[in-house]
Amino acid sequence: MKRHSVLAVVLCLPIVLFGGTCVVQDILFGINVEGRLKRAADANSVELAIQEMDAVVTYLEVNHMTGGYTSILYRTPDEDVGFWYQNLKSALEELKRVRPETTPLERTNILMKLMETLIDSGENGKSIITIPRGIAVFPHNTLYCLWAILGGITAIVGVVQAFLKSI
């Protein structure tokens, strides 16, 4: 392999590593938060919903996902992590207030309210879990953005350099 080809590969590594890291972060978030929120929304008993919601809230707290915005340049309400976290925590507290003497109708109403809190209607009526955009890499969104920009620039330089040397 020629030296310019090796340099091109090395210059492309940051963007490849960036992509791989984003995929891993998205998978981990999907398992620990999105998947559990879906299970909580689908729960047929308050106890199951508490189990899933408790795991989500704990994960968010351990990973410092309790406040701030996922956006980098400007703030929009759909990217407010603090509101989203407080809403989830409030839903969990409401579930925990259910007592043995709570009627089946009241339990059903609480579970329906939880489902409405956790799930939105997406395109074509498809249900989606309510989460802020960009949350999988939160609270490091700015660093990931810089990584993507710098990795993209180095990859372009590497590809252009390899192309020019091959001519």
Image: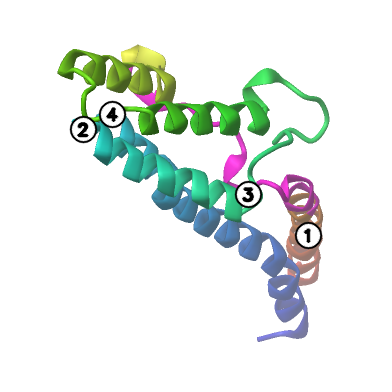
Q: Which of labels 3 and 2 is toward the front?
A: 2
Seen as rendered, the residue at the extreme front is: 101
> Which span is picked out in magenta?
126-146
Task: Provide the residue designation for mark 2.
Answer: 45
Q: CA distance from mark 2 to mark 1?
A: 59 Å
Determine whether the residue tagged by mark 1 lies in a helix, strand or loop.
Answer: helix
- For the question of whether residue 132 can be seen, the reply is no
Q: Quadrant of residue 45?
A: top left
Question: CA separation, marks 2 and 4?
Answer: 13 Å
Query: Could you tell me how far apart the alpha carbons at marks 4 and 3 are, in whole angstroms?
Result: 37 Å
User: Who comes first in sequence, dot 3 or dot 2?
Assistant: 2
Q: Is residue 122 above or below residue 87?
A: above
Residue located 43% across and 20% down the image: 117
Query: x, y (%) of residue 25?
Result: 54, 55
| Residue under numbered circle 1 | 160
Residue 72, position as x, y percentages in the image: 79, 35
Q: Residues within 10 Å of mark 3 (few under 14, many from 20)?
A: many
- Label 4 is placed on what type of residue? Arg
Residue located beneath label 3 in the image? 137
> Which of 135/90 is in front?
90
Residues at discs 2 and 1 in contact (Cβ within 8 Å) = no
